Image: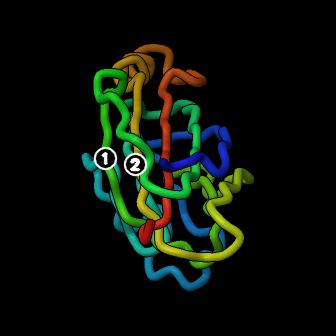
């Protein structure tokens, strides 16, 4: 049975309906965030990076990260507005959160002590509330919530 190896919570400052996770060792990436960002795609994947589209324009989302030793059990879709899976190659084993407004943030997500290939399941709730905030007040904190579950691709 799959086990959680580590858990972490970070905040993602969203601008222009998006944020990204990119390998901490980003010097060799062919395309850095936000270049080639695909609007309208919930989760996009590029070498060494994940692009995630939000329901709201500008706000701070809560991102819970779980690293598993094998594929985690499926999440009940009834509890989430969106879900998607993607592949990710990380040369460093660490990801950093990127914003379209502020660029690279200080938040580092540790997947492993070294690089490897990963699968990730991204689940999101609060998309409609984040959209409503964008149309009204403009910003909010923790209204939109993400769960990112990573596991080794060869598990």
Label 2–label 1 contact, CB within 8 A: yes
Q: Quadrant of residue 90?
A: bottom right
Q: Could you tell me residue 64's position as x and y percent?
A: 58, 38
For label 2, the crowd category at 10 Å Cα-Cα, with few meaning under 14, some 14 to 19 and many 20 or more, is many
Which residue is tagged 1? 84
Q: Residue at x 44, y 46 (%)?
A: 72
Which mark sits nearer the N-terminus, 2 or 1? 1
Q: Nearer the viewer, residue 109 or 128?
A: 109
Q: Position of residue 55 (x, y in %)?
A: 36, 31
On the rendered structure, is 18 left or right of 40?
right
| Residue at the limit of the structure toward the bottom, as seen here | 28
For residue 121, the mark is 2
Per the model, the C-alpha gap separating discs 2 and 1 is: 6 Å
- Quarter holding residue 13: top right
Q: Which quarter of the rendering shows the C terminus? A: bottom left
What residue sits 45% from the left and 82% below the top?
30
Q: Looking at the image, is 28 positioned above or below residue 117?
A: below
How many numbered marks does the figure carry?
A: 2
Q: Is residue 151 left or right of residue 113?
A: left
Q: Residue 11: which quarter of the image?
A: top right
Point out residue 20 in the picture as x, y percentages from the top left corner.
Answer: 50, 54
Q: Nearer the viewer, residue 97 or 39?
A: 97
């Amino acid at each position: 049975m799959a086990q959680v190896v580590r858990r972490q919570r970070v905040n993602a400052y969203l601008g222009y309906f998006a944020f990204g996770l990119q390998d901490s060792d980003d010097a060799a990436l062919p395309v850095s965030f936000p270049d080639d960002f695909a609007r309208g795609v919930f989760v996009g994947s590029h070498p060494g990076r994940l692009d995630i589209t939000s329901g709201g324009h500008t706000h701070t989302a809560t991102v819970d990260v779980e690293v598993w030793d094998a594929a985690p059990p499926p999440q009940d879709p009834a509890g989430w507005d969106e879900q998607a899976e993607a592949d990710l190659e990380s040369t460093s084993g660490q990801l950093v959160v990127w914003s379209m407004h502020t660029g690279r943030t200080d938040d580092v997500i540790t997947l492993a002590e070294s690089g490897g290939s990963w699968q990730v399941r991204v689940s999101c709730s609060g998309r409609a509330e984040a959209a409503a905030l964008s149309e009204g007040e403009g910003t909010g904190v923790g209204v939109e919530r993400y769960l990112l579950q990573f596991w080794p691709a060869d598990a």
